[in-house]
Image (cartoon, grey):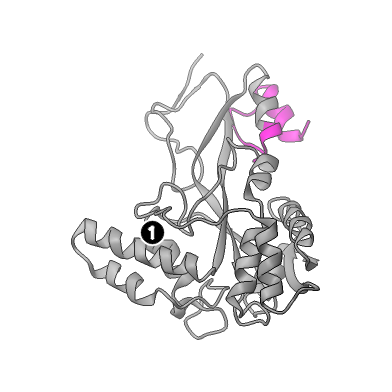
């Protein structure tokens, strides 16, 4: 048991940040005094494919990678309650999310696509990977999955600040990245998939894939006053990004907190943009 868990159990703490793992959640739910809160927005995990690096500039190779990754295995590892599966490059529940286009796990298809691209003996991809628990274990699973298709993933494990720095210098073929943003499609599409956000450029944000196929639709959605038309532009942007295999949707790692039975939030906790249960004038400790 961690020091914070001991402090919570002894009554020194009434609110505690939990561990975002299903096993931890299940164990906490069985313990007296632990009320588990799981809520959005979660940090949405995508696997970005850097198109500026051969052979990732070949769409057949990118499609092979998408077909070789079994997202359901990743979800089973983190747990359905804590890390539900994503279906689009826009996070679950965001205004404008569209799941018309999806990738499916198909190992035979992955091998066939690699052979068609001239890589029947396989390929090697290099990736910078953070050593934090919210990233390295998942990249190890992905590494094992890709190996079955003949894709060797050479991972350079570094501390998190180094990972953040090096992935922004185009040193990684695959970039596993998670973020929670204001829940509308534009926040993700603009930051990760507009050409102005490509890493290494003067206007860089976190477009690790060098994706630029949906600029027009992203920009049109920003200026569209009619809601249905705005959603249609977002939909078309997502279709183009998915068709180009700029990134592979993985899962949303939700927020996990626990509170003592005597702590009354004073409201029904459904979500919080500060990623923690808000303490308001309605919050109280009961005797």
Q: Residues within 10 Å of mark 1 (few under 14, many from 20)?
A: many
Which residue is drawn at the image coordinates 26% and 62% (left, top)? 230
Q: Is residue 272 above or below residue 127?
A: above
| Front position in the image: 45 or 15 | 45
Quadrant of res 151: bottom right
Local secondary structure at mark 1: helix
Which residue is drawn at the image coordinates 69% and 59% (left, top)? 108
Q: x and y percent of residue 202 in the render?
A: 50, 86
> Is residue 132 shown in magenta?
no
| Front position in the image: 7 or 36 | 36
Pick out the residue farthest to the top: 287
Q: Is residue 258 left or right of residue 24?
A: left
Q: Please provide the residue range marked out in magenta.
A: 1-24
Q: Is residue 26 left or right of residue 90?
A: right
Q: x and y percent of residue 34 in the render?
A: 62, 23
Q: Dividing the image into 4 quarters, which one contains the N terminus?
A: top right
The residue indicated by pointer 1 is 185
């Amino acid at each position: 048991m961690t020091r914070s868990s001991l402090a919570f159990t002894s009554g020194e703490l009434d609110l505690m940040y939990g561990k975002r793992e299903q096993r931890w959640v299940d164990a906490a739910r069985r313990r007296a005094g632990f009320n588990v809160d799981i809520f959005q927005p979660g940090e949405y995990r995508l696997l970005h494919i850097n198109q500026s690096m051969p052979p990732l500039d070949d769409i057949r190779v990118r499609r092979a990678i998408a077909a070789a990754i079994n997202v359901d295995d990743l979800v089973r590892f983190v747990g359905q309650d804590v890390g539900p599966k994503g279906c689009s490059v826009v996070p679950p529940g965001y205004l404008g999310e569209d799941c018309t286009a999806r990738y499916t796990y198909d190992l035979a298809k992955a091998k066939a696509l690699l052979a068609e691209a001239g890589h029947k003996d396989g390929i090697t991809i290099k990736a910078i990977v953070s050593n934090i628990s919210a990233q390295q274990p998942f990249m190890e699973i992905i590494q094992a999955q890709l190996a079955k298709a003949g894709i060797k993933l050479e991972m350079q494990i570094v501390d998190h600040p180094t990972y953040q720095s090096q992935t922004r210098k185009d040193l990684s073929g695959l970039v596993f990245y998670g973020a929670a943003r204001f829940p509308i499609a534009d926040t993700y599409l603009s930051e990760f998939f507009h050409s102005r956000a490509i890493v290494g450029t003067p206007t860089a944000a976190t477009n690790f894939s060098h994706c630029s196929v949906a600029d027009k639709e992203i920009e049109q959605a920003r200026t569209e006053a009619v809601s249905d038309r705005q959603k249609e532009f977002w939909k078309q942007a997502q279709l183009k990004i998915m068709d180009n295999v700029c990134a592979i949707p993985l899962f949303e790692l939700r927020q996990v907190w626990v509170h003592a039975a005597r702590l009354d939030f004073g409201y029904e906790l459904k979500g919080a943009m500060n990623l923690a249960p808000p303490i308001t004038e309605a919050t109280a400790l009961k005797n």
